[in-house]
Amino acid sequence: MGGSCERAGQDEQFDAICRLIEDARTIAICAHTSPDGDALGSCLALAEVIERTWPGREVTVLLADNDVVPRIYEFLPGVERHVRACEYEGSPDLFVCVDLSQPGRLADARAVLERSAHVAVLDHHPCDEPCWDAGVVRPDAAAAGVIVTEFARHAGCALTPTMAQNLLCALMTDTGCFQYQNADGEAFCVASALVEAGGSPSEVSLHVYQSDRLAYLHLSATVMGRIVTFERGKIAYSYATSADFAATGVPVAECDGLVDLVRRVDGCEVALFLKEVPGGKVRGNLRAKSDRDISAIAREMGGGGHPAAAGFTVEGDIDQALSTVLPKLRALYVEPPATAEL
């Protein structure tokens, strides 16, 4: 990759991560709970980078949840190597957080992190309280896959076709196939390098965006039929219940894309999608099509994310979640009181 893909200040932090890897013999890599394409693809690519650059390391790729990889990501090279964190009994020399920097989003894997000797982070989400020995946290990066790609280059590891495919999936899914505001010049520069290395945009698109099961399409129709708007159409909202998932047979893990149906409403600036998940909880997805920052609202709800894409999980049902988050979204459109003239 050319110099335009580089970011000043990363080299020293990458060097520190390399030293941790060099000193480790057992390494666990894990992303956040409910992993998406960026989380899964970046972890798998990083595992291969480490194994090729530092032979002899025992690298385990963990799933934070006691669940399976979502069906649309089963095509990723090496996906079968995932181990559920609740089944992993080791105390690794190094734990690498990918696509997250907050232990609270590690679910079952947090216990593994806490018994690890050292912690490293490669992430693009904002974090106010660093809790690692070495890390690169760059909120301006379009995806964690961008940072992992640049780490591979820094480590002198040539990208293989399998790395490139995993990283391209990471980048394409976190930019919405380069439709979102985060699709900047760096993202396209990295994408070009990944395609040159053997990544296939058409294969990612086929599996992630063009292979919906009929049951999922039926659920999508239900969600679309429920869309309502607030604040003169600037906020669009819909939801799916546990009964919807049971009736269609669609797992909750397959439903991350439903928020994009809500996001497509003409004139909508903020999209909200709520879904009931096991344990009496509701998971919320937020997307922004304007410059309004919805990540602060997600953090208020106990979650996090980016200004244009964020999420949260709360106790209760759909009505309770909506009654809490909707006023916060509406507050984005409250005009400040006029200042009295002297």
Image: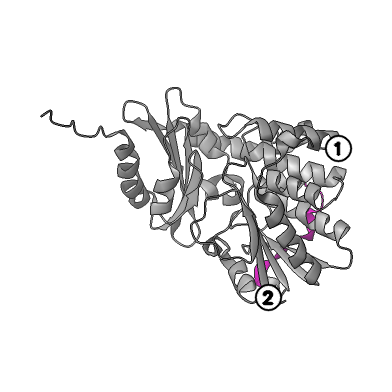
Q: Pointer 2: what residue?
A: 117
> CA separation, marks 2 and 1?
36 Å
> Where does residue 15 sit, x and y in percent of width and height?
74, 58
Residue at horizontal 54%, vertical 38%?
A: 258
Q: In the rendering, which numbered label is found on residue 198?
A: 1
Q: What span is in magenta?
A: 76-86
Quarter of the image for the N terminus: give it. top right
In magenta segment, residue 297: no
Q: Is mark 2 on a helix, strand or loop?
A: loop
Quarter of the image for the C terminus: give it. top left
> Where does residue 259 sit, x and y in percent of width and height?
51, 38
Q: In the rendering, which numbered label is found on residue 21?
A: none
Tell me if 111 is positioned left or right of 271 in this view. right
Badge 2 amino acid: Ala
Residue at horizontal 55%, vertical 31%?
A: 181
Can residue 98 be seen by looking at this rendering?
no
In magenta segment, residue 84: yes
> Where does residue 38 sit, x and y in percent of width and height?
66, 46
Q: Is residue 326 above or below residue 236?
A: below
**Quadrant in the picture for residue 164:** top right
**Quadrant in the picture for residue 59:** bottom right
- The answer to which of marks 2 and 1 sits earlier in the sequence is 2
